[in-house]
Image (spheres, rainbow, N blue to C red):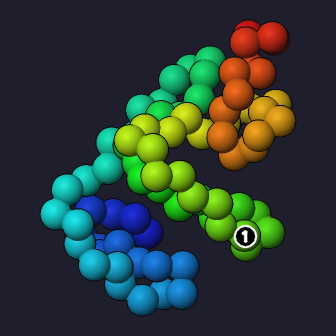
């Protein structure tokens, strides 16, 4: 199964990534963003990569953000 704990993490190129020794924490909220411990790199659908060196980032899951993939709390308008 892809992404199972028994398989090593892989870079999009298919090469195994170096183990950092610690797992990243991802917090999923029902009506809000996905919180990810940083720093992070996010690969978008078009193949471009955006990054943040913050200690925690909020990733937009509703696609209403003007700063997608980063959450700008636009989900609060309709939640």
Q: How many marks?
A: 1
Q: Residue at x 69, y 46 (%)?
A: 69
Q: Secondary structure at mark 1?
A: loop
Quadrant where the image shows the N terminus: bottom left
Left or right: where 41 falls relative to 47: left
Looking at the image, is 40 positioned above or below residue 56? below
Left or right: where 36 falls relative to 22: right
Q: Residue at x 66, y 33 (%)?
A: 71
Looking at the image, is 9 positioned above or below residue 34? below
* Spot occupied by residue 42 in the image (x, y as percentages of width and height): 59, 59
Looking at the image, is 40 positioned above or below residue 54? below
* Image quarter of residue 77: top right
Quadrant where the image shows the C terminus: top right
**Residue 13 visible within the image:** yes
Q: Label 1: few (<14), some or many (≥20) within 10 Å?
A: few
Left or right: where 8 falls relative to 32: left
Residue furthest to the left: 21
Instruction: Work out whether residue 51 or residue 6 is closer to the camera in this orientation and state it.
Output: 51
**Residue 36 visible within the image:** no
Residue furthest to the front: 53
Q: Residue at x 81, y 11 (%)?
A: 78
The residue indicated by pointer 1 is: 48
* Spot occupied by residue 18 in the image (x, y as percentages of width and height): 28, 78
Looking at the image, is 58 positioned above or below residue 49? above
Q: Residue at x 80, y 69 (%)?
A: 46
């Amino acid at each position: 199964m892809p992404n199972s704990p028994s398989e090593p993490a892989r870079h999009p190129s298919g090469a195994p990534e170096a183990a950092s020794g610690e797992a990243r924490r991802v917090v999923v909220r029902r009506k809000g963003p996905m919180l990810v411990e940083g720093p992070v790199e996010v690969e978008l659908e078009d193949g471009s990569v955006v990054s943040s060196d913050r200690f925690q980032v909020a990733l937009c899951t509703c696609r209403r953000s003007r700063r997608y993939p980063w959450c700008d709390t636009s989900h609060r308008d309709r939640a």
